Image: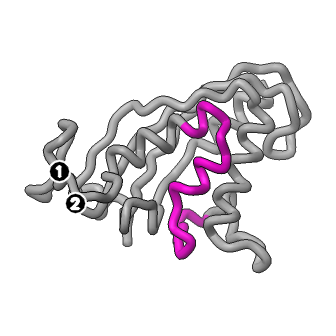
Amino acid sequence: MDRRALLTALCASGAASVALGTTAQAAHTTGRQLIAAFAATLSRHDIDAFAALFADSYVNHQVSAATPPPPSSLTPKQASVAFFAARIKGLPDLKVTIEAQIENATMAAASFLYEGTQTAPYMGVAPTGKRLRFTSCDIFRVVNGQFAEHWGMGDIAGVMAQLKE
């Protein structure tokens, strides 16, 4: 599904919510809570807690030159967790904040801001000591209190430009 169409549908649905507590409060974790946990676990560098946010059957629809399909030896969940583990390793002071978010009964979307200092190899670039600041926009389908699917885009070109300045 096209990300723009998905965001448009999410925003246009009568169930869309930007205020905490206005979506169905089932026994499961809400999309808003998962989005908050996504940022918090990465900021704490708790990769095990981060991995627990994703269903074992997780599907990542974000495939591009910057995020190629995972090797056949890894599931999409394992590949996503490995991608963020490498980000934490390359930016050991990584902090993730939420710029904006929206959710409905089955979908959650957020714009995340990532900030950190590159003191270890990252994306094939030797340590530069540079402070990086970049964003991503991510859309998740939530099932049984976990991320089940993902569509998104990150500012990989911006990251590379900052690393090479």
**Which amino acid type is shown beneath numbered disc 1?**
Thr
Q: CA distance from mark 2 to mark 1?
A: 6 Å
Q: Could you say whether the residue bearing mark 1 is in a helix, strand or loop? A: loop
Judging from the image, the colouring scheme is one colour
Q: Position of residue 70 (x, y in %)?
A: 71, 70
Q: Position of residue 119 (x, y in %)?
A: 84, 26
Say if mark 2 contacts mark 1, CB within 8 Å.
yes
Residue 23, disc: 1
Identify whether 80 is placed above or below 76.
Answer: above
Identify whether 151 is placed above or below 156.
Answer: below
Q: Nearer the viewer, residue 97 or 5?
A: 97
Q: Nearer the viewer, residue 71 or 63?
A: 71
In this rendering, the count of numbered labels is 2
Residue drawn at (13%, 56%), measured in percent from left and top?
Answer: 15
Residue 159 image-quadrant placement: top right
Q: Which residues are magenta?
A: 41-63
Residue drawn at (28%, 63%), measured in percent from left and top?
Answer: 106
**Extreme-right residue of the structure:** 126
